[in-house]
Amino acid sequence: MKNLVKILATLGLIVAIALILKGVFGVGKIGLKKVSKNNTIIFDQCYDPSEFSSYEKAYPSDWFEKWNFKINLDLGTVVRTMVRKDETIQKFNGLKYRQQIILKRKNLTIINDSKSTSFSSSIGLLKSDNNIYWLLGGLNKKGDKFELPKKYYNNIQAFIYGENKKFFNKKLKGKIAYKNFSNLKDALKKIFFITKKEKFLNKTILFSPCAASFDSFKNFEDRGLYFNKLVKKYFNEL
């Protein structure tokens, strides 16, 4: 009887905590993962409901940003962490021009991330590989901060184009080597010239502008399509 009461009490507590999480953190979906022996409850699959409204049709559910909650009943603490599924970008089939691999050869990968309009949206890709040739530029977001850890600086060369080159120069100065170009076409042409000489080195050309596109394009889709056409034209002429 005591065990039954204990089980019912635990289930009641779990439901109560779940409701609190839903109210305090705005959690849209809660699933119990496990109750450990040291009086710790872990909730998994706690998705931000705002993600559903924007992306439920574009992404599989396991691509949503996920919140994990760890609740220690003895200490009365709640720890929330926010993570993403650790999937390779090759498996990504979501929004067009968002971390989209458009070419993959033995020693070369080209990624079209035209949807990137801020530094924060590019950080993950900048951490993902060595020998990254990073194309960026356009109309920067006011107050945008470049917060890439120092250990990644030497893996990247930046090729800046567009209207607000001074802003990007200031953010990258003393961190990442960069060159300036008047437009995207010239910047990409320079990258192809460099990478052509490095045949045996694994490398990634990353088009992740970290800026709005309106200085030169209608929108990020127009910008992404233009980049794809430049890449196709180059390889057709080889």
Image (cartoon, rainbow, N blue to C red):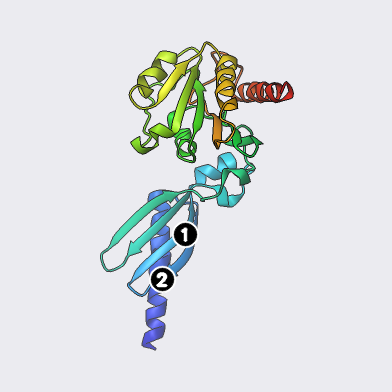
The answer to whether 161 appears left or right of 19 in the picture is right
Determine which residue is flagged by label 1.
44
Determine which residue is flagged by label 2.
35
- Disc number at residue 217? none
Q: Residue at x 39, y 89 (%)?
A: 1
Foreground residue, 61 or 228?
228
Q: Quadrant of residue 233?
A: top right
Foreground residue, 18 or 92?
92
Instruction: Report x, y in % for residue 217.
Output: 60, 16
Tell me the element at label 2.
strand
Instruction: Report x, y in % for residue 26.
Output: 43, 49
Instruction: Report x, y in % for residue 48.
Output: 48, 47
The answer to whether 139 appears left or right of 153 in the picture is right
Q: How many marks?
A: 2
Tell me the element at label 1.
strand
Q: Residue at x 64, y 34 (%)?
A: 96
Q: Residue furthest bottom?
A: 1
Foreground residue, 149 or 2?
149
Instruction: Report x, y in % for residue 74.
Output: 27, 69
Disc 2: CA contacts within 10 A as few (<14), some (14-19) or many (>=20): some
Foreground residue, 57 or 136?
136
Q: Residue furthest right?
A: 236
